[in-house]
Image: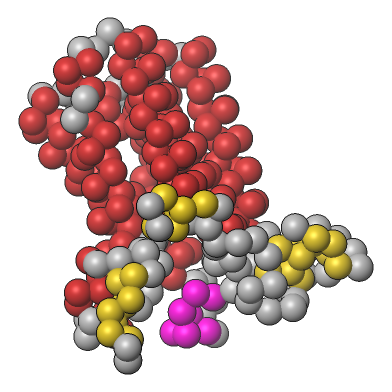
Amino acid sequence: MATHPCYIVWDPAMSPFSIFGFEVRYYSLCWIIGLFAGYLIMQHLYKRQKVSMELFEPLFMYCFLGILIGARLGHCIFYEPEYYFNHVLEMFLPMKETSDGWKFIGYQGLASHGGTIGLFIALWLYTLRTKISFAWLLDNIAITTPVVAGMIRMGNFFNSEILGNVTEMPWGVIFAQVDEYPRHPAQLYEAIAYFVIFIVGLMLYKKFPSKVGTLFYFGYCLATIFTFRFFVEFLKEVQSAFEEGMTLDMGQWLSIPFMIIGFVYMWRGFKKNA
């Protein structure tokens, strides 16, 4: 990272190291750190609430596959349907078909809204197998989720993607791999917000542990994350051409139902056991 008159120039290497010739990218590393942190937090919650570790063990794989598949399909369907419906294999493979053949590029394009939907489906399937209360599970996952979301946005920052609008603010960042204009580091705004949401949620949990199972924490997570997501979109560049000229972009339209559901469940959970 370097300075540029009064702005920050961001031009990181895409990969900090390689293993057996395979480059490990910062984006993938952030995902791994986020998921591992989420794993440890959920493990702690299971132990604290005296739930068998045998029931905990399969949860990570359900969450990982649900988030990854949902986020990938969400991006392809919500943001680039015309391209991916004509390149169906690229929806599922971390590769791209080029004039020189297939090229490994990793999964470029993951939508948080799709990841949220995928996670819900995965958790529902997990509860069918384990007979754990779906409401109890959603509340515990909600306490954990902001950490994972924050690390994913850190990965977006390293990838110089999901760019903010051009700005004259002194903390503007020039993403050198994209262009020479200082922009809002919208990815960092989101990452910081999600980490704060996690800390506040954890404090609420320690003060009101009896609210677990009322869907209060589930509502809190949706309401806070997607409300912030709605407003931060005003500081972002549009992600797809079809969003040009729209009063609200696709991310904002997709956030509205999550916001409403979140506030409803947060209020209903607050009223329970009061």
On screen, residue 213 above or below 65: above
Q: Nearer the viewer, residue 1 or 83?
A: 1
Name the quarter where the C terminus is drawn.
top left
User: Can you tell which quarter of the image residue 213 is in?
Assistant: top left
Q: Nearer the viewer, residue 3 or 99?
A: 99
* Residue drawn at x 46%, y 39% as measured from the top left: 33
* Residue drawn at x 56%, y 52% as measured from the top left: 16
Residue 243 highlighted magenta (yes or no): yes
Q: Residue furthest bottom?
A: 99
On screen, residue 196 above or below 136: below
Q: Nearer the viewer, residue 15 or 49?
A: 15
Residue 3 highlighted magenta (yes or no): no
* x and y, in percent, of residue 84 in the image: 27, 79
On screen, residue 155 above or below 123: below
**Which residues make up the magenta segment?**
238-244
* Residue drawn at x 76%, y 65% as measured from the top left: 9
Can residue 75 be spotted in the picture?
Answer: no
* x and y, in percent, of residue 236 in the image: 61, 68
* Residue drawn at x 71%, y 63% as measured from the top left: 10
